[in-house]
Image (spheres, rainbow, N blue to C red):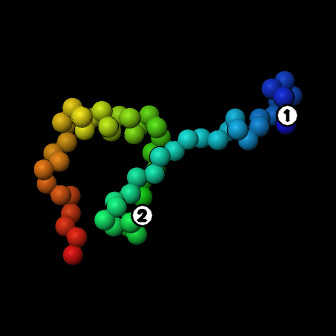
């Protein structure tokens, strides 16, 4: 494994963490990929009631 002094990065240093979000009722519809920081912001905004969660965004057939 390269050391920090030889100018190369190991695989563990360049791996980025991501979070995948999908609709469990429509798993084939794809997913969103967000960073942990953006996901934390989404969770915080939901907890603060910044979103109207009383209506469905769409209705499944």
Residue 43 locus on image (x, y percent): 32, 37
**Residue at x 73% of width, y 41% of height:** 11
In the displayed structure, 57 sits above or below 52; it is: below
Secondary element under disc 2, as helix, strand or loop, is: loop
Residue count near mark 2 (Cα–Cα under 10 Å), binned few <14, some 14–19, many ≥20? few
Image quarter where the N terminus lies is: top right
Task: Report the residue at 21% width, 32% height from top.
Answer: 48
Q: Mark number for residue 30?
A: 2
- Graded by Cα atoms within 10 Å as few (under 14), some (14 to 19) or many (20 or more), the crowding at tag 1 reads few
* Nearer-N-terminus badge (1/2): 1
Q: Secondary structure at mark 1?
A: loop
In the picture provided, is 56 more to the left or to the right than 3?
left
Residue at which label 1 appears = 2
Residue 28 placed where, x, y %? Answer: 40, 69
Q: Is residue 4 above or below residue 25?
A: above
User: Which percent across, then down, holds residue 10?
Assistant: 77, 37
Q: Is residue 29 left or right of residue 46?
A: right
Q: Are marks 1 and 2 in contact (CB under 8 Å)?
A: no
Q: Vertically, is 53 above or below 37?
A: below
Task: Identify the residue shown where x is 51% and y is 44%.
Answer: 18
Residue furthest front as drawn: 24
Give the residue drawn at x 17%, y 48%: 53
Q: Quadrant of residue 6?
A: top right
Residue 12's disc number: none
Q: Residue furthest top?
A: 5
Total marks placed: 2
Q: CA distance from mark 1 to mark 2?
A: 37 Å
Q: Position of residue 9 (x, y in %)?
A: 77, 35
Residue 54 is left or right of residue 15, and the answer is: left
Which residue is most to the left?
Answer: 54
């Amino acid at each position: 494994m390269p050391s920090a002094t030889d100018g190369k990065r190991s695989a563990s240093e360049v791996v980025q963490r991501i979070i995948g979000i999908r609709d469990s009722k429509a798993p084939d519809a794809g997913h969103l990929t967000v960073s942990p920081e953006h996901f934390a912001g989404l969770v915080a905004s939901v907890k603060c009631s910044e979103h109207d969660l009383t209506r469905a965004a769409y209705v499944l057939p």
